Amino acid sequence: MEYVEREFGEPEFQKGVSPERAKKYFEDLICGISFMHGKLFVHCDIKPANLLLTKNDVLKIADFGLSVSILADEYIKSHRGTRYTMSPEMVEVDKFVHGRSADVWSIGVMLMYFFIGMLPFNEATSECDFYMSWIAGESSVKLPWQKIAKEPMDLIRKILVVDVKSRATLKSISKDPWIMGGEDQVKDVKKPRFKKVKAEKKKVQVQKVEKAIKESAKDPKSAATHQKKNVTKQRKQEKKATEDLNDLKDEKPEKIPKRQPEKRKQDKEDAENAGDAENLKNRHGPSKRQRVPKRQWAE
């Protein structure tokens, strides 16, 4: 588990960040959420306190306590998350909403937060004046988002759309002109790579093979000599195997001497002379088991 020092809920972000940093954080955010959606999970609680920053200023997503699997269906039950980043459809109770679109609304709210240092809506309902001004498309100077530049503002307007069908998707966001432009462009959202232990072993083996190929290319004579040695060694092994097989064919199996009848006769006479007839019986095999009458069983 990685230790991350900072979060976006700290006072240093209350005045907003530069456009370059805001863009960089937003790219990290859509990359992480795209990875989650690719694994068929939705976060449902994207907010400043759940976005962390590493020493290298890389955004990390945290707190998956409200995450939901969308294996069976992309629709999830509403009213999950924090109200000031919830989508309008998610605020309503006892409804089934499109989970991925709800996450997209939340990242749009966070993009605005990166620029202005505050969350624009208390909740996406008619009770919030800023939300109603946003829906109406008002352009008053008093509105907090008026200081945002045109290109990122155009993207925010594509994301924070009440109609789910008209709302931008992660794919369309990654191809937006503001995201695509500049040196730190994101042409496509890619899944992060995870290191594997087995991959390192394979890499070492591949390097050894490549090294051998390069050496043979530099010195063709040494490669030919090495190949000739291998052929000679193989021929010697085949010759030795053939000789061993011929030796086995030439060998005759040893005859096992039979027991002499005189010996058997002598053993029998010795046993009779000793008066051990019972021992003679046991020698040829075990005696038969005596049967017990049924009457004795009852007793």
Image (cartoon, rainbow, N blue to C red):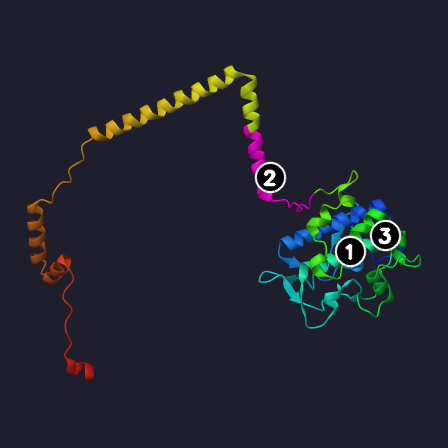
Q: Position of residue 212 (x, y in %)?
A: 54, 25
- The circle on residue 115 is 3
Q: What amino acid type should be assigned to the residue bearing mark 2?
A: Glu
Identify the secondary structure beneath mark 3. helix
Q: Position of residue 17 (x, y in %)?
A: 87, 50
In this view, the residue farthest toward the top is 221
Q: Which residue is mark 2?
A: 200
Identify the secondary structure beneath mark 2. helix
Q: What amino acid type should be assigned to the residue bearing mark 1?
A: Gly
The residue that appears at 81% across and 50% down in the rendered structure is: 154
- The circle on residue 291 is none
Q: Which residues are magenta?
A: 188-209
Q: Is residue 254 left or right of residue 138?
A: left
Q: Is residue 192 magenta?
A: yes
Which sits in the foreground, 21 or 153? 153
Q: Which residue is mark 1?
A: 108
Image vertical order of residue 173 relative to residue 9, above or below: above
- Marker count (numbered): 3
